Amino acid sequence: MIEGLIAGLFDGISIGAVLLIVALGLAIVFGLMGVINLAHGELMMLGAYTTYVVQNGAKGLGGWAVESYIFVALPLAFLVAALVGLLMERSVIRHLYGRPLETLLATWGVSLILRQFVRSVNSPMAIGLVIFAALFVVGLWVLRRYTDWERIRSWANPVFFLLSFAIAALAGFILQSSGSAQFTRAWFSARNVDVTPPSWLRGGLALGTVLQFPYARLFIIVLTVLCLVGIYWFLQKSVWGLRIRSVTQNRSMSACLGIPTERVDALTFALGSGLAGIAGCAVTLLGSVGPNLGGNYIVDAFMVVVVGGVGKLVGSIVAAMVIGIITYLVGSGTLALVLSPFAALQPVTDFFTFFATTSMAKVMVFALIIAFLQVRPAGMFPQKGRSVEV
Amino acid sequence: MAVDLPIQPRRTSKALRQKRLLIEAGIVVAIALVLILVMPLVLTGFRLGLLGRFLSLAIVALGIDLIWGFTGLLSLGHGIFFALGGYAFAMYLQLTELPAGQLPEFFSLYGVSSLPWFWQPFYSLPFTLLAMVAIPAIVAGLFGYLVFRNRIRGVYFSILTQAALVVFFNFFNGQQKLINGTNGLKTATSVFLGQQVGGPEMRYFFYVATVIALALMYALCRWLTSGRFGRMLVAIRDDENRVRFSGYNPASFKVLVFAVSGAIAGIAGALYTVQSGIISPQAMDIGFSIEMVIWVAVGGRATLIGAILGAVLVNIARTMLSERFPDVWLFFQGALFLLVVTALPDGIVGWVRSRFGDRLPALFGGPSAVPAYVAEMELEAESYREKELADQ
Amino acid sequence: MSQSVATPLPIADPLTAPMLKISGLNFFYGESHILRNVDLTVPKGQMVCLIGRNGVGKTTLLKNIMGLLRPRQGDIQYEGQSVTALSPDQRARRGIGYVPQGREIIPRLSVRENLLVGYEALGNRGQSINRQTIPEEIFELFPVLKTMLERMGGDLSGGQQQQLAIARAMMGKPKLLVLDEPTEGIQPSIILDIEAAIRRIIATAGISVLLVEQHLHFVRQADYYYAMQKGGIVASGPTQELTNDVIQQFLAV
Ligand SMILES: Nc1ncnc2c1ncn2[C@@H]1O[C@H](COP(=O)(O)OP(=O)(O)OP(=O)(O)O)[C@@H](O)[C@H]1O
Ligand SMILES: [Mg+2]
């Protein structure tokens, strides 16, 4: 009985930890810019694929590399996702500042592209992309240097974009149709791929006869705690953290004080995206990796942001844990089991039995969230002077 | 300061307005007649079926436009209402012509021996027709009430609708014993009004029904958005607080319009279901619901005709692209999202309008879709100007 | 985005150019014309005071100077160079310190952090300064702040916030200090403190000041005055010439 509850609590916390690590980046970005990034799940997926690639490399090396690939994969996943996030922010999101709904749609567009990208990326496409980036960047640099850029930018930008795109697409197409089968094969199979965790993360920590804490989940909990500590330290103690907090609370005054708000935005977005990459790396320990990996976590992560409220990390922490624990207790049937000895509570037990699957538990959690929002529309820890309507 | 209502009286004279309205009605009827009478001669049965489906999707687009284009509420969960309408009709089709006491076939797979209680009313056609509209409307209204009364809006509202969508998906997906879970309900072999639903006669019947429904829904939305109510919606979109300070309650308007939009989606879902032969939880896929928004955006939000055009065009593009290059479609769709948001915020109709100005027929009329923040600035400036006048 | 900025004046010699020179500035909120052909100059090392009734556009002018609002027409020159195209943070880092109306203290940063944020305006100037500590001069100007470094900025009283806002602006070693009604809603004794601090700043740091003020006593400390009405400058001159007539006309209700 007690063991069951402890095991349930542990599983709930571990679900909460995954949610939290996914939601962390979202919450920070949302707090600063009022932007919800629907491509957050796809940034996770990029982190997961990075882990997969690193692991394949490690398999080639064999031995110790297989055991420790994850410590290379984590920072790499962070970097890859952060770079893609940075690119997103610089190219699209910053033009949509102050239009959160449009930003939502734009990030969804990015998420579709990223999903299809991992399905169909192959060498010709990658080469085409590199050509495109080179043409566009070099072209703009030349233009900026030798012409009156401000005057021509309104038409030069799109024209240059399309031109580079057309050339790159042509090059990619030629490579695609002339290359060998080996050369044009997609990098990742369309089906999900598996990442084998290192052997020290398989199995679990046994306590007594019943309790078993899987190492993979313990690892994720520890990782989440480390991320939290890192973020907390960064926000509270570093110069950039101070800037981020200042801009989050009062953007225009921060600008008047000389804080470069555009760079703060870019950095924060990259940071949030990088955290998604870490989350993606973490969830490879729990299941297989596929283009739709992000979708499984992302909506729950949004709910963490909604329930936690913006602007305070502790809100996200509590929300993630509560949602995780309730989801687990209801979904696994633990609650129904606990209530079953009491005959008088039979209807209640039946009620909880009805919801005792993972997906039905989500139904119940959502109902609870809506109920909660009736009491606290701005979340658990609403930020003073900031309304829900961001 | 004189409290100025967010609603300005229309200046056009009544006679002119009536004339325009007549012209517009004429155009709508003409287009409907072309769709009903000419299209079947031009298109093969398969293509006509596709067009019918696209037109029913255009109906949802109208509903989306009503709340997003006009009222500024971005719903990412309209798949719920679409599916509810579809399920309502499909449940009726499962039961009709069934010998008394017998259950739809799939129930036996899960060992269900008696019909779940909520299926019972769907023996009746009038109830079904009502339910198709009323259930989505009630669900939307209830959800809207719980959310709007707390002044939750903007991105928060959008992601809550998305979460609701996922929840409904989970529910329908997980309940085999109640509604056949993942497999959904098939309608092609059922019999409706003495004919097989999948047969050619019925297919044409539903095509015509779709065209008529689209025309009616267009008229409804046109009516809703052109009068006082419509200007109220736009005022809410542009500056909700100002509406509140003027003594109106924006929440109730939003609940109402959200419910209407849900009902419209329900009708669309029912028509789509019978034309595609199945309704399953896939209709509540996250991507499908967001795609609905892009139809409206492509056509031009806050223009009803834009919603219809966008829905049909994007779906034609999808069919053509995914027939030939299945890989490209997602890239294309993603690029479409980015393009519409960054470069073409007013969509096709907005673009046409900006090129040809005011000389367009009333069909393309209606309030403009300037991004809310611009309108907000102008509105604010206007109120300050008035204040200034009052001060002097 | 400024649509048609008047052709920038020829770049003046930064040594002799005035600190700030605004010429032909026009600003609109939507369609309402808020600032009309404003010309205003702040000479180096001088204190200039802008007066005018509520709602004439003083704050709007200062926001244009900071870059929070973009003029439709006109040019703003700072140290002889046009800053009209620069963003607020770039202007701040060039040495314009801003103390806004309403103080705009960052509410959930501690007083210490609010002050440290003030260093941001240093940019590349003052590389040698240790940006982790707060210099004693600040506490000499505003002794109250020393006792409440760890309190949240949002929890201070209005008067304390005002002092914090000025101190914060001083952290960035501005060359031009722009103050918007620093004595608004503050009790007389604190007003005297603030006045004394500002006088001391001018005396010791030798910076230029543009001040929006309603308090006559304070206005009289300035070297020059500009009077504003309905968005335009209607009178200006040395403060000695600021007669009661002018005051009656443009300030009294
Ligand atoms: N965001 C805004 N949108 C439209 N008009 C505005 C806005 N802010 C201010 N105004 C108007 O611009 C005019 C000038 O305002 P401003 O704040 O510059 O006045 P002020 O001279 O600073 O007044 P006070 O002495 O009360 O501070 C006023 O008529 C005001 O109503
Ligand atoms: Mg003012």
Image (tube, coloured by chain):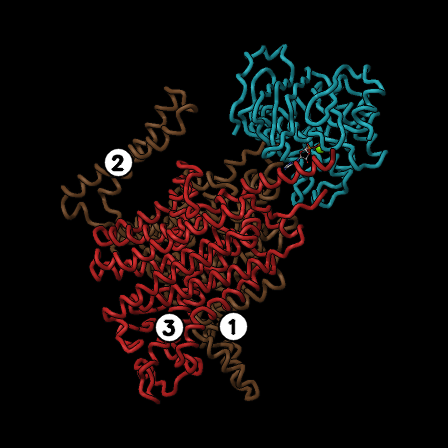
Chain colours: A brown, B red, C cyan
Say above or below: A353 vs A160.
below
Q: Is mark 3 within 8 Å of ligand 1?
A: no
Res A277 seen here? no
Q: Is residue C97 above or below residue A338?
A: above
Q: Give the CA distance from mark 2 to mark 3.
A: 48 Å
Q: Which amino acid type corresponds to the residue marked 2 in the rendered image? A: Ala
Disc 3, SS:
helix
Q: Nearer the viewer, residue A207 or A126?
A: A126
Residue type at numbered disc 1: Ile
Q: Marks 2 and 1, how far apart in space?
A: 59 Å
User: In the depicted view, which residue is nearer to us: B353 or B380?
Assistant: B353
Q: Kindly indicate whether the residue at mark 1 contacts the one at mark 3 (C-beta within 8 angstroms).
A: no
Q: Residue furthest front?
A: B15
Residue A308: x and y, percent?
A: 56, 57
- Residue at 45% over, 68% down: B133
Residue type at mark 3: give it: Phe
Mark 1 falls within which chain?
Answer: A
Q: Which residue is mark 2?
A: A166
Q: Quadrant of residue B115?
A: bottom left
Quadrant containing the N terminus of chain B in the rendered view? top right
Q: Which residue is found at the position 43% from the left and 49% from the top? A: A105
Nearest to viewer (mark 2 / mark 3): 3
Locate residue C174, reporting x and y percent: 65, 24
Which disc number belongs to residue B89?
Answer: 3
Q: Which residue is mark 1?
A: A6
